[in-house]
Image (tube, rainbow, N blue to C red):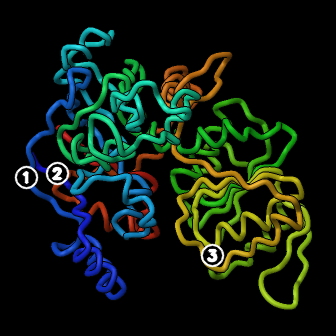
């Protein structure tokens, strides 16, 4: 079968790093780490695993970071090369190991989403680590151990395959059946939504508070959707780059949109919307007096981190949702000057929802089933796997493509 894989070799890394500074498609041409090839379908690692035929596979912001080599080398031990890319998914069960068939209440042909985290239980590790015992599966300490090769998730492990191919394998514990009234287009966006649902639930804003969401890609938009789906009445202000993003944020429930453009003084506009005061220092960016109670940075760049800290009010909370690796030029002064609490967030986990502990994926599916959220309007582009270079180009040029979320579509 055809698969899009990440090679992970040093010569290809060096080539793309050097050539990519001159021409961007050097990050995904034939000399890069991104390779389309014929591969054998992965074997079931143990009888507890199942095979899933891919219907849709999402193109995540982390996949874009991978292609552009923006990921920190400190994450490389948590992958096994070469691996088939793709952790966002919706598909159908086509094969079940004997133990999986005994333990699952679903059968062949069931439509599922797969929580891709390869934590202790999928790896056959018992007793589970302290993080997994708490339900914090994204913080598992055994991503390099157990019955499959290193990898934090399906899509970074050479033994499991990934969504950017027609088939991959998953442990039975990772499967969540998709209700009949939930479309596959909604289902494939569950992972992206959960990347925002997790930090929102862990830092849920009070109804009388103000929230600032920096970044209106699918993660920032999902943060707006998550707050409203959970009944939050906080005032939501978003900082967006493009008009089509701001329009989507408004439809999802944002109260105000400020645009970050070359021709706008977005600091002055944000200060006006947030009812804060700006002070001019001797050098550097303006100092913000006041700010939002909670700021979700859904970008993870040096600029967004710096802005997020500045626009958090005293004793407020700044949540780093976007994947940051090497931020430069960030002024950390607001952390101590305003006693800002900075919290990180990685992927998804287990949350308390309506009186019981549930995996974030399960909560997302329940919100879809009950009509409290609709994610499919965020899905703007579909591509065939053979058009992967066009898909990458569209994701790297969202201003012209007007892309919010894209997926690969399979028969």
Q: Which of the marked residues, 2 or 1, is nearer the chain's N terminus?
A: 2
Residue on which the image places disc 2: 3
The disc, 3 or 1, on the residue closer to the chain's N-terminal end is 1
Q: Is residue 332 left or right of residue 116?
A: right
At 16% from the left edge and 56% from the top edge, which residue is drawn?
A: 386
Disc number placed over residue 109 in the picture, else none: none
Q: Position of residue 362 (x, y in %)?
A: 49, 25
Q: Quadrant of the C terminus?
A: top left
Count the marks.
3
Q: According to the image, label 3 marks what residue?
A: 261
Mark 3 nearby-residue class (10 Å; few <14, some 14–19, many ≥20): few
Query: Cα distance, mark 2 to mark 3?
Result: 38 Å
The residue that appears at 79% across and 41% down in the rendered structure is 234
Query: For the point 24% across and 56% down, which residue is it?
Result: 81
Instruction: Measure the alpha-carbon separation of dots 2 and 1.
Output: 6 Å
223 relative position to 66: left or right: right
The residue at the point 83 percent across, 61 percent down is: 273
Q: Are marks 2 and 1 in contact (CB under 8 Å)?
A: yes
Secondary structure beneath disc 2?
strand
Q: Earlier in the sequence, mark 2 or mark 3?
A: 2
Assign a secondary structure to mark 1: strand
Residue hosting label 1: 38
**Residue at the farthest front position:** 127
Is 349 drawn above or below residue 111 in the view shown? below
In this orientation, which residue lies closer to the viewer: 49 or 90? Answer: 49
Query: CA gap, disc 3 to disc 1?
Result: 43 Å
> In the rendered view, would you say 130 is above or below 215?
above
Q: In the figure, 134 relative to 326: above or below? A: above
């Amino acid at each position: 079968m055809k698969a899009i894989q990440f090679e992970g070799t040093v010569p290809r890394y060096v080539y793309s790093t050097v050539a990519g500074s001159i021409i961007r498609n050097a990050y995904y041409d034939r000399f890069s780490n991104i390779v389309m090839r014929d591969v054998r379908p992965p074997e079931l690692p143990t009888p507890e695993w199942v095979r899933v035929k891919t219907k849709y596979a999402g193109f995540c912001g982390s996949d874009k970071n991978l292609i552009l080599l923006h990921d920190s080398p400190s994450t490389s031990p948590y992958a096994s090369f070469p691996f088939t890319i793709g952790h966002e998914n919706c598909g159908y069960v086509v094969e079940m190991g004997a133990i999986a068939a005994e333990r699952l209440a679903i059968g062949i042909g069931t439509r599922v989403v797969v929580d891709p985290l390869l934590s202790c239980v999928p790896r056959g590790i018992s007793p589970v680590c302290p993080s997994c015992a708490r339900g914090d599966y994204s913080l598992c300490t055994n991503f390099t151990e157990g019955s499959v090769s290193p990898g934090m998730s399906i899509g970074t492990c050479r033994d499991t395959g990934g969504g950017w191919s027609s088939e991959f394998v998953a442990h039975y514990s990772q499967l969540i059946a998709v209700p009949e009234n939930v479309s596959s287009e909604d289902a494939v966006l569950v992972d992206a939504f959960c990347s925002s649902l997790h930090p929102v639930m862990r830092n849920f804003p009070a109804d009388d508070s103000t929230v600032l969401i920096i970044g209106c890609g699918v993660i920032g938009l999902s943060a707006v959707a998550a707050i409203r789906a959970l009944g939050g009445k906080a005032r939501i202000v978003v900082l967006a780059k493009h008009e089509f993003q701001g329009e989507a944020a408004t439809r999802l429930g944002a109260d105000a949109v400020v645009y970050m453009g070359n021709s706008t003084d977005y600091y002055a506009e944000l200060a006006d919307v947030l009812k804060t005061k700006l002070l001019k220092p001797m050098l550097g960016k303006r100092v913000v007096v006041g700010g939002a109670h909670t700021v979700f940075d859904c970008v993870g760049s040096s600029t967004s981190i710096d802005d997020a800290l500045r626009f958090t009010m005293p004793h407020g909370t700044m949540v780093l949702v976007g994947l940051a690796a090497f931020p430069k030029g960030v002024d950390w002064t607001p952390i101590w000057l305003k006693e800002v609490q900075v919290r990180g967030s990685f992927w998804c986990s287990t949350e308390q929802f309506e009186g019981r502990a549930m995996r974030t994926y399960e909560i997302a599916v329940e919100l879809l089933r009950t009509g409290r959220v609709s994610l499919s309007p965020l899905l703007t582009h579909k591509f065939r796997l053979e058009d992967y270079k066009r898909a990458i180009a569209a994701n790297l040029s969202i201003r012209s493509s007007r892309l919010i979320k894209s997926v690969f579509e399979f028969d």
